Amino acid sequence: MFPLASLFLIIALFATAILASEANDSPEELACAAENQSEVDEEQMYTNLIEFVRSGDGFVNPSLVVRPVEPNASFRGVFTTDSVREGDVLCSLPWHLILKAEDVDEIREEELTICRTIRSVIREMKLGEDSEFAPYVRYLLSTPKVQLPSLWSADGRDLLMNIIGAENEHYIMNPLNRWLEDCEGGDDPLELQAAMLTLSRETWDLMIPFYDMHNHHNGHKLNTIIEIREGEKIEIRAARDIEKDEQVYESYNFCSECGGRSTGYGTTELLFDYGFVENYPQRWIIIDDVVEFDLDYTENGSHDELEVRWLTKHVPSKSDILKLNEEIEQLEALQSSSFSSFDNKVPHHEWEVTKQYLSALLVALKHAVEAAEGVEGSPTIVVSEDFDYEEEEEEEE
């Protein structure tokens, strides 16, 4: 046996070696190690969620994986690791794997379905690891705080209202008011987060694990279609052939299960309800909500040319064009005065999103004016195939 003093000496030397090793790690190395461990934990969380679906008699296509949308980005999406053919099933969930209104503990008389769904989500989030939906709850709890404009700072909302007009504040506040007023909900932080998560992720008042991780895009990039068989299952299929390494998208307003969003709902409304400015194609509703158009790159695939497609028979008249030009002038003045440099009174994320929205709106309005006037002063009419267009004569004063 070693003498007791020798044993203490060995322990001391071992401890000193450990401390010396830790001391040699720079703050950058320690931060990198922590970030790598976080990424490992996050990857495991997505793996567990997919396994949760599969072990519950659901299906997730083996060609799908969750990964950053760009290298080193924290923002993630669902991608293919192999090509997928049109009509192939991407994921399928039986009814018992979906969080829904009937899962709520207490049915309140005349309560909206979405309110019951929110309360179901709140209950499961409070149960945490004891929830039957634990892998899904773990994912929900790990998501960053929802950044909807209704939850922005007062300065951030004021900045946005300078663009859309103070009279439209109720549109900004709609998601929060749905919970606080329509659902008579409370402002407990966890309950509020659960409510905003549900309102920004639900599909037909249903919370669908894994499917709600798909990002939004319209146009050619939209490549999924969803089928809801109430009481049985939900199935998501490829709407077209999807190439290897392509991101898999859903639509928050053009999908078959989006309710009444096919008209009167566009880029501005998506910002209010989801907190982001969508990429092209964009949909804009202007001039007292009677002029509606899509703005997208030309069909020849050029990313240098944008094209307006009118969605209603009402194309801006000469008086409308005057109003649009006045609005463009006002917005350009606002852009110069409020967005030439960062305003530290407004949280950076809110300032950036508002700046992005203002830029997108200006581009849209200018293209609408150009399309309405035409190169030679006559209207340029490019109309959606959704209806037969007959140009209406408008009397000008």
Image (spheres, rainbow, N blue to C red):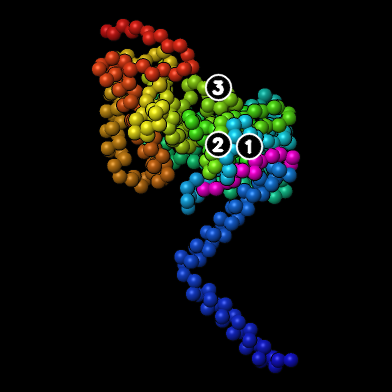
| Residue shown at the point (31%, 15%) measured from the top left | 379
Q: Which mark is residue 90?
A: 1
> Mark 2 or 1 closer to N-term?
1
Q: Secondary structure beneath disc 3? A: loop
* Residue beneath disc 3: 260
Three-letter code, disc 3: Gly
In the shown orientation, is residue 42 left or right of residue 274?
right
Does the image show residue 310? yes
Distance between the alpha carbons at the discs numbered 2 and 1: 11 Å
Q: Which mark is residue 242?
A: 2
Q: Secondary structure beneath disc 2? A: loop
In the rendered image, which quarter is residue 345 located in? top left
Specify the quadrant that holds the C terminus: top left
In the rendered image, which quarter is residue 14 located in? bottom right
Distance between the alpha carbons at the discs numbered 3 and 1: 25 Å
| Residue 189 horizontal/vertical position (percent) | 57, 44
| Residue 135 horizontal/vertical position (percent) | 67, 47
